Image (spheres, rainbow, N blue to C red):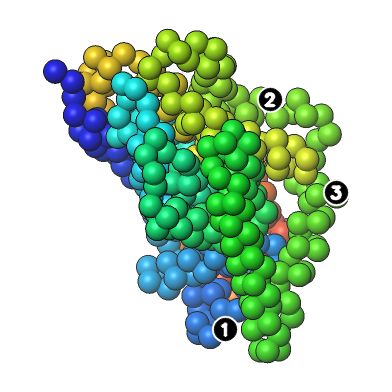
Amino acid sequence: MRLPPRLFLAAALLLGLSVVWVRPGPTLLIGGDAGCYARVGRELAERELSQWLELTLAHEPFLEHPPLALWLNGLTVRWFGPSPAALVGLTRVYATLTLLVLAAAASRLVSRRGVAGLEGATLGGFTVLGALTLPGFLYESQVAMLEAPLALALAVGLWAIAGLLSGATPTPERSVLGAAALFAAALVAGFWVKGPPVLVLVGVLVVAVALRWVRPSVALAAAAAGLSLIVLSALAFDGLRESRGLGPFFSTYLSKQVLASVTEGRHHPDRNPFFYVGPTLSWYGPAVGALVLAGVALRFRSRLERLSVEAVVLGASLWLGVVVGFSLPVQKYQWYVHPGLVGASLLVGAVLALLPAKLERFIAAGCVLLALAWPLVRLVPWEARLSETQRQIAALQSAVGPARGDSIADCSTMDPWVSGHLFGFLWDATRDECATPAGWRFDGRTLSRP
């Protein structure tokens, strides 16, 4: 007797929730830009909502990213205070929703296209497990930066594309229109989080059209609606800012941030494309292996009744679209491959689903047992696992004393960008060089009066 597919999916999700929400050690604002985005959120939270048209960093205009995720940071700080745990908790919410949407997208792919011997919920469960095998997902689920909300938008877009696929039975036009509207909404949300990388969804849709899985007219309508809404919402936002005496945001962002990245590259540029091999294997090793196995499986697909060709192709298209389409051309550093994690999860899930059905109950039982035992990771000594920078961040977050406007002499070994923005987020204090007379001194382990 086979395990009911929904129980398999529930077991995988239970493990996913445990892994995302229970972690050893302190909750830290790690990541080079985490303190920066947290600081923007704090400065928003301290102003009236009517003044949120202007984003500031260190009380200066901040034009490097669209405002949606930063507004959500501001709401989180307003409700829960300038707490690192609150902002990492928001990231965990994004990660949880991403797992749920990925499971829904995988289930819809099977229900729309049909796969002999494979239920939609089963592929959804394997897709969740696929995400949990990826170091990129495990890392981003704990880092309060912009990749997690962008990944959620991409997952919603993938779910919408699954709803646009032609099926074995006629699809009501109402369902197609709903999927097209959802695709447009995902494009807009992703753009308002981090700009152009969300356009990889259009590339995935083009692949589906080329393979005749989606009607060209439907794809064109969905993409045109999303792109039009992006342009109209950006123009409306800039117009509203100018009516309040502020300068335009999106035109400045596109010219000074996006165009500069495309033409010059920023943040550790490296002209050797092999520079990305190491980071990609490190963060997405299982997906690389799954891509090879999927290529072999497609060769023998007539013999593999549990193979979802659509999951393999769409997942690989989204993942590789992010890596090749956005990371390599603008020479971004390794973490810019992370938004592709939703496609990599679907790809790995499609390969895992090739395991014999009789193993599903054992896999599900293992997921439940591991989820129940997972809280024991809190008993594992975590100090030795932290890098020196993480140790200093932990010490800084546990410190008390400074007040708004205080200066702190930074004698730590942290990058000044990281420590400066953490000072600003935690206390709205300013960073000074170690030798500068200041009200406080941080030596990397303690914060004290000089």
- Find disc 1 in the rendering and name its residue: 51
Residue 255 placed where, x, y %?
A: 81, 63
Name the residue type under label 1: Gln
- Find disc 3 in the rendering and name its residue: 264
In the rendered image, is residue 388 in sight? no
- Write the residue at 66% across / 25% down: 278
Find residue 332 and report its image quarter.
top right
Name the quarter where the C terminus is drawn.
bottom right
Q: How many marks?
A: 3
- Upstream in sequence: badge 1 or badge 3: 1
CA gap between label 2 and label 1 equals 44 Å
> CB atoms at circles 1 and 3 under 8 Å apart?
no
Tell me if mark 1 has few (under 14), some (14-19) or many (20+) residues whose alpha carbon lies within 10 angstroms of its own. few
Find residue 239 and report its image quarter.
bottom right
Q: Secondary structure at mark 1?
A: helix
Residue 361 placed where, x, y %?
A: 21, 21
- Write the residue at 50% across / 55% down: 180
